[in-house]
Image (spheres, rainbow, N blue to C red):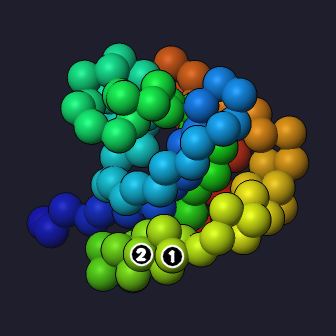
Amino acid sequence: MEKIYIYYVYILTTKYNSVLYTGVTNNLSRRCIEHKSGKTKGFTQKYNVHKLVYFEVYDYIDLAIAREKQIKGYSRAKKEKLINEFNPEWQELCNNGMIKNLIHK
């Protein structure tokens, strides 16, 4: 039996919503934990970016990667609009590996 994957494009921010980071993964819960633990070297560790505020779900990795690139090309204002429509309060969507509002495509 072939393993079926689900892919996520996500946006993280800081405690005070000052920095935005866009990424892609096939395991959003695991990825959130990695970001929160600070074990992921690079941008998110350096700027303490670990609050999940937005995500989209995809069945195919190529679509997820294309969307990630599209969002990365957006202006800050356009990214904020996406987040505001999805999560107006900019609440943390990943607590202790549990994802809130998982069904939202």
Q: Amino acid at mark 1?
A: Gly
Q: Residue at x 65, y 43 (%)?
A: 53
Q: Is residue 92 left or right of residue 31?
A: right
Q: Quadrant of residue 71?
A: bottom right
Element carrying mark 1: loop
Q: Residue at x 25, y 23 (%)?
A: 39
Q: Name the image quarter holding the N terminus.
A: bottom left
The one nearer the camera, 93 or 41, is 41
The one nearer the camera, 56 or 79, is 79
Q: Amino acid at mark 2?
A: Lys
Residue denoted by label 2: 69
Marks 2 and 1: in contact by CB < 8 Å?
A: yes
Q: Quadrant of residue 7?
A: bottom left
Q: What numbered label is drawn on residue 28?
A: none
Q: Is residue 53 left or right of residue 4?
A: right
Looking at the rendered image, the disc whose residue lies closer to the viewer, 1 or 2, is 1
Residue 98 position (above or below residue 10): above
Residue 21 position (above or below residue 74): above
Q: What is the distance, in whole Å, between disc 1 and disc 2 at their CAs?
A: 6 Å
Instruction: Return the residue found at the far left.
Output: 1
Can residue 100 be seen in the rendering of this structure? no
- Percent across and percent down for residue 15 are 65, 24
Residue 47 position (above or below residue 70): above
The one nearer the camera, 4 or 17, is 17
Residue denoted by label 1: 73
- Percent across and percent down for residue 17 are 69, 36
Element carrying mark 2: helix
- Check disc 1: other Cα within 10 Å, few if <14, some if 14-19, many if 20+: few
